């Protein structure tokens, strides 16, 4: 066990990093996220399948963390988010991965699902801070306390906005206060980061992602309207890549891809609102885009 691991034995006596506020001692037991203090990752690589501003020409330096504080039943990364398949690494090893990805030509360090490892990520960045932007790639269900703690280490926020109905959030993510928490978190992120884009690459800023879901087009439109009203200068990435995965088969209503009619309905609202950002083609709904986990 390293010095930094020993430090976290003290720090992590009571974990309230995410809005679940488990309050568990992660040295002794797992929180809702399914994680203990030990960092666990499933893959790190140059990743080309992010938004153009994030992937650029040479790829985003993605690190896929295991466990999750949201645990959507349909998650395309279900094996690592809910089943925690991955490899344990130390804080020092995470810092080494930062440098490896930077040396490989990554245009940023992309922390995928980082919330429950915020303490360890901060410590790793103290060991080695890359000269490229740090991306906080999150489901959006974040506590303001954790965001305030990690914000000075982050250059780009890449959050999801999944639901505009707490009933749906509770059904598919066991989360009855999702909308209230996420809207506050998004406002905080936007206030902290103005967009800086150079040569087609985001150096600083924020992009909100929204995944169109079966039978939820009204929620999608409400989300787009909320963004337009509350965060009008923010780029929106509209995603059509939903494929039934994980435990989606247990919910008949979402056990299919979205239809062309559903896609066009949300797309029309996106254009009518004059939003700026990125739009996935309907053909993106393929499992081929799900990463192959290394560990």
Image (cartoon, helix red, strand yellow):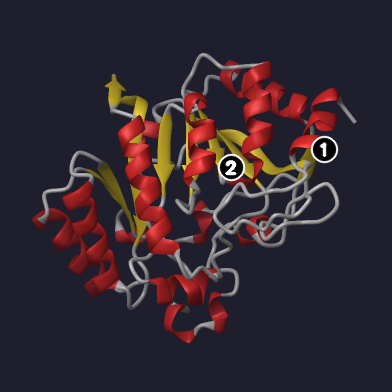
Under circle 1, the secondary element is helix
Q: Is residue 225 above or below residue 202?
A: below
Q: Is residue 40 above or below residue 202?
A: below
| Percent x, y of residue 106 | 52, 24
Seen at 63% across and 46% down, the residue is: 116
Q: Nearer the viewer, mark 2 or mark 1?
A: 1
The residue most toward the bottom is: 252
Q: How many marks?
A: 2
Q: Residues within 10 Å of mark 2 (few under 14, many from 20)?
A: many
Q: Which mark is residue 114?
A: 2
- In-front residue for pair 77/207: 207
| Percent x, y of residue 35 | 73, 52
Q: Residues within 10 Å of mark 1 (few under 14, many from 20)?
A: some
CA gap, disc 2 to disc 1? 19 Å
Q: Is residue 35 above or below residue 261?
A: above
Location of the N terminus (image quadrant): top right
Check contact, mark 2 vs mark 1: CB within 8 A. no
Q: Is residue 199 above or below residue 70?
A: above
| Percent x, y of residue 97 | 68, 26
Q: Which mark is residue 67?
A: none
Under circle 2, the secondary element is loop
Q: Which residue is mark 1?
A: 9
Residue 57 in view of the camera: yes
| Percent x, y of residue 80 | 67, 55
Locate residue 145 relative to residue 2 in the image: left or right: left
Seen at 42% across and 77% down, the residue is: 167
- In-front residue for pair 261/178: 178
Residue 162 in view of the camera: no
Locate residue 164 relative to residue 119 in the image: left or right: left
Seen at 67% across and 61% down, the residue is: 32
Q: Earlier in the sequence, mark 2 or mark 1?
A: 1
């Amino acid at each position: 066990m390293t010095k930094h691991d020993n430090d976290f034995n003290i720090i992590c006596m009571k974990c309230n990093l995410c809005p679940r506020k488990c309050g568990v001692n992660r040295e002794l037991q797992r929180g809702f996220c399914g994680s203990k203090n030990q960092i666990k990752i499933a893959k790190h690589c140059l990743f080309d399948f992010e938004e153009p501003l994030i992937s650029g020409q040479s790829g985003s330096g993605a690190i896929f963390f295991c466990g999750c504080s949201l645990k959507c039943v349909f998650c395309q990364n279900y094996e690592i988010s809910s089943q925690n398949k991955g490899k344990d690494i130390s804080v020092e090893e995470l810092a080494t991965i930062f440098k490896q990805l930077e040396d490989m030509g990554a245009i940023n360090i992309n922390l995928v699902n980082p919330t429950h490892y915020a303490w360890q990520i901060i410590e790793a960045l103290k060991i080695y801070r890359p000269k490229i932007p740090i991306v906080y790639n999150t489901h959006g269900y974040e506590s303001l306390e954790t965001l305030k703690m990690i914000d000075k280490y982050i250059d780009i926020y890449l959050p999801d906005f999944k639901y505009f109905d707490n009933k749906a959030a509770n059904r598919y993510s066991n989360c009855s206060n999702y909308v209230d928490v996420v809207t506050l978190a998004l406002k905080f992120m936007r206030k902290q980061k103005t967009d800086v884009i150079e040569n087609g690459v985001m150096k600083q800023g924020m992009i909100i992602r929204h995944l169109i879901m079966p039978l939820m087009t009204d929620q999608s439109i409400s989300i787009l309207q909320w963004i337009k009203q509350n965060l009008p200068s923010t780029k929106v990435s509209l995603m059509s890549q939903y494929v039934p995965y994980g435990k989606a088969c247990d919910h008949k209503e979402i056990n299919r891809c979205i239809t062309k009619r559903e896609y066009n309905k949300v797309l029309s609202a996106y254009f009518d609102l004059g939003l700026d950002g990125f739009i996935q083609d309907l053909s993106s709904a393929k499992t081929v885009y799900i990463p192959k986990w290394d560990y």
